[in-house]
Image (cartoon, rainbow, N blue to C red):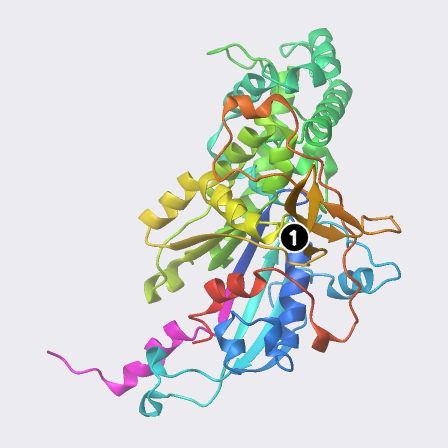
Amino acid sequence: MRLLRYDKLPTLTGLVHDSTLRLAVTGLSHSGKTAFITSLVHNLISAIQRPARLPFLRAAAEGRILAARVLPLGKDAIPLFPMQKTVSALSGDPPHWPPSTTDLRQARLSLRFSPRGFLGGRNPIWRTASTADVTVEILDYPGEWLLDLPLLCQSYEQWSRAMFDLVRRGGRAPLACDWLDFLARHPADGADDPEAAFLAHNLYRTFLAACRTSEQLSLLQPGRFLSPGQMADPSMLWFCPLPLSIGGQVRPRSLAALMAARFETYKRDLVQPFFLQLARDVDRQIVLVDVLRALNAGEEAFADQRLALDIILGAFRFGRRSLLRRLFGARIDRVLFAATKADHVPALQRDHLEALMADLVEAPSLRAKAAHARTAATSLASIRCTEDDTDIIEGRKLDVVVGLPEGGEKRIRFFPGIVPVRPPPPGFWGERFTEFPVFQPPRITRATEEGIPHINLDKALNFLLEDTLA
């Protein structure tokens, strides 16, 4: 047996204590990405003085996080997450929720900590250094952009047929009338008319927005039609699917040919660069899901959310990290699926919410495990807005939550109903689950030492960072 050479120790130590860890915060619109990043940064900094804010983050509980600071713009020049604006919103009078994610952003946090020992051992003989430093880079981007990654493997004809299969079903169909009427007057094999293409795009984008607003659907492509971000040439978005016959050819100089060319430009100039950035930069991932919102929206919205999540997570590369994979492209070796707004249900219901989250992402979770990545499911509230209490409802003592509705003056006692642990059967969907209020966030101080109240943020961070801070 060959003995371990001492000159190999730096390489092995680098694998255990990598100098940079990249965390992707993934979620569809209104899933809580901005709140999560704000709370993560604020509470990790506060853990220096108040480790009790994160009792289940082992490194904080053991007093091993020695320093934390927000870093400036990195070498890749990704715009910084607007931490000051989000803190200003939460420290306002009254406090209010910060704006949602609209473009690619990055928060960079430097952590200095005391390692527990080489390879996690407690024996001081094995210690390689009294302190270590890690930079946590948190990538934030509209989750809708991820819905476009499957387009890289589709032709315009394939994508159009897939979209029309969806359009003709369920709640989408009545919302598409104006767009479909316009297409009936401007057939796919008609003249190459840029103005008609622009108008068709606008009607299709209006249709997608209605699907999200009135039906609360999730699988809405292209994702940048609803979250465009910054781009040099907006005209690359001016296309939409067309009703093409199976096996039919796109006629040159036709409306379909114009749409197809713009579809290919969209993939090349927007989708492909974004995909390459994700493939290169992500080590860990947290997937935030507003399960309660989909449950409230009904059977079609719930099923659509499951399908959208499956499509999104199919774009990521999972696998155990190693030196070779660090050299030839990162792999996500830990992914956490988190049902957000856990503060909208009382404590006993949060286990139900976690179980429902695990069921919702069962397929992508199994794929990640098959690639030797670690997965977990949880429920969390990045910023806790309520307190648990009990109330007498129809003669029964029930658990409720108490909070101040946004824009209100009086706190309310809210009973959310019983959260199912599995996707509900067809008979469940006869009426809406419940109407969840939007609670006003707690007012925080700008001083990071105070931290932000939360539910299970520390458990989430421990899963994502435990080995890095070991």
Q: Residue at x 83, y 59 (%)?
A: 95
Residue at the disc numbered 1: 343
Residue 94, position as x, y percentages in the image: 87, 58
Q: Quadrant of the N terminus?
A: bottom left
Q: Position of residue 353 (x, y in %)?
A: 54, 45
- In the image shown, does 287 or 437 lie closer to the viewer? 437
- Tell me the crowding category of disc 1: few under 14, some 14 to 19, or many 20 or more residues within 10 angstroms, Cα based: many
Q: Where, quadrant-wise, is the C terminus in this rendering?
A: bottom left
Name the residue type under label 1.
Asp
Residue at left offset 27%, top offset 87%: 6
User: Which residues lie in the magenta part?
Assistant: 1-22
Residue farthest to the left, as pictured: 1
In percent of width and height, residue 247 lies at 46, 11
Does the stretch in magenta take in 20? yes
- Residue at (41, 82) in percent of width and height: 116
7 lies left or right of 443: left
- Against 268, residue 453 (above or below) is below
